Amino acid sequence: MRKRLTLVSPAKVNLFLCIKERRLDGYHNLASLFQAISLFDTLHFSVSDATRLSCSTLEIDSSNLILKAIELFSAKTSISVQVEVHLQKEIPIEAGLGGGSSNAATTLWALNQLYNYPIPPHQLPLLASELGSDVAFFLSCGTALCTGRGERLEELTLPARSVWIAKPSAGLSTKEVYRHLDMQSLPTRDVEGSIESWRGAHPILFNDLERAAFSLMPELSTIKRELSKRAQVVLSGSGSAFACFGENFYCSLPHVKLYQASFINRTHNCWYKSE
Ligand code: C5P
């Protein structure tokens, strides 16, 4: 009997994102409040005689983070992992919603469960950070202040909220957005005060990557202006999706797809669930 496991893989939004400085290794130190949301991909795992990855919508190549997570898990545990994975993609790509990073974190969690926990769960975030700056976040319980290049987590709890995701049809490359960042123009931010604001009625939203993203894709500032008539709006990560917080929100802009979601969290021993 083949061992099988199906797990959801959630998206995230950045409630605020403060860029601190450019580092010698080319990355940027940041302080960002990350929140998991109920917009999910689904990953089906089945232990097999060869590793194969298929996807409902995407072309798969060797740079895919699910394959990289399988390789890393095999290398760290010395287990010859052979697993078939099918990815049902719902999270838009090039959106700043962390879909690829979430898929990688979900894969590490799934393999650890399928192969009887060769890695203590509290060590998974460290492993995850080798795959990308955002991957460790998805092994948190769903709300965290992320610092360093994004891989250092301080877990937090926030009141539940609904969020609308507005995704323009064009996407943005994270690397390109960071490359267009003008460090001189960044304002000073009150990170602690901004965290506190999310516990009350007047949350503070900002994203220091917005200006760089808007310079690469000027239509984003028009879209933000329109969305802001009906909600508090912030670009998520490096974009191009916006997180929108407002009652009775709607959007009639052409080429902008809307997704309704809410904040989600998990308990320490259980993976995310779709209900
Ligand atoms: O870590 P990840 O592979 O997701 O990062 C993609 C790119 O985004 C990096 O190559 C880097 O150019 C940029 N980046 C950055 N500072 C961060 C995170 C990402 O400059 N904190």
Image (cartoon, grey):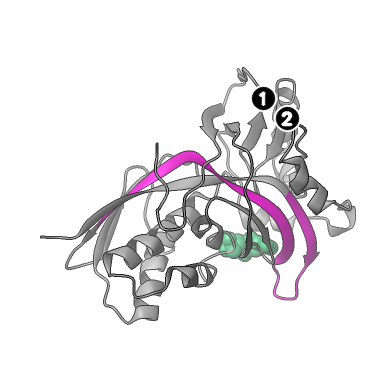
Q: In the image, is residue 148 above or below residue 260?
A: below
Res. 250 image quadrant: top right
Magenta span covers which residues?
Answer: 17-45
Q: Residues within 10 Å of mark 2 (few under 14, many from 20)?
A: some
x and y, in percent, of residue 17 in the image: 73, 50
Tell me the amino acid under the disc marked 2: Gln
Residue 64 visible somewhere in the drawing: no
Q: Residue at x 64, y 36 (%)?
A: 242
Q: In the image, is residue 85 above or below residue 39?
A: below
Residue 27 visible somewhere in the drawing: yes
x and y, in percent, of residue 247 in the image: 64, 20
Question: Horizontal placement of 240 versus 89: left or right?
Answer: right
Q: Between 250 and 215, which is closer to the camera in this rendering?
A: 250
Q: Between 155 and 212, which is closer to the camera in this rendering?
A: 155
Ligand 1 closer than 8 Å to label 1 CB: no
Question: Horizontal placement of 79 versus 153: left or right?
Answer: left
Question: Horizontal placement of 190 versus 16: left or right?
Answer: right
Q: Between 101 and 5, which is closer to the camera in this rendering?
A: 5
Considering the numbered disc 2 on the image, is that residue within a helix, a strand or a loop? strand
Q: Residue at x 29, y 78 (%)?
A: 79
Q: Which residue is mark 2?
A: 232
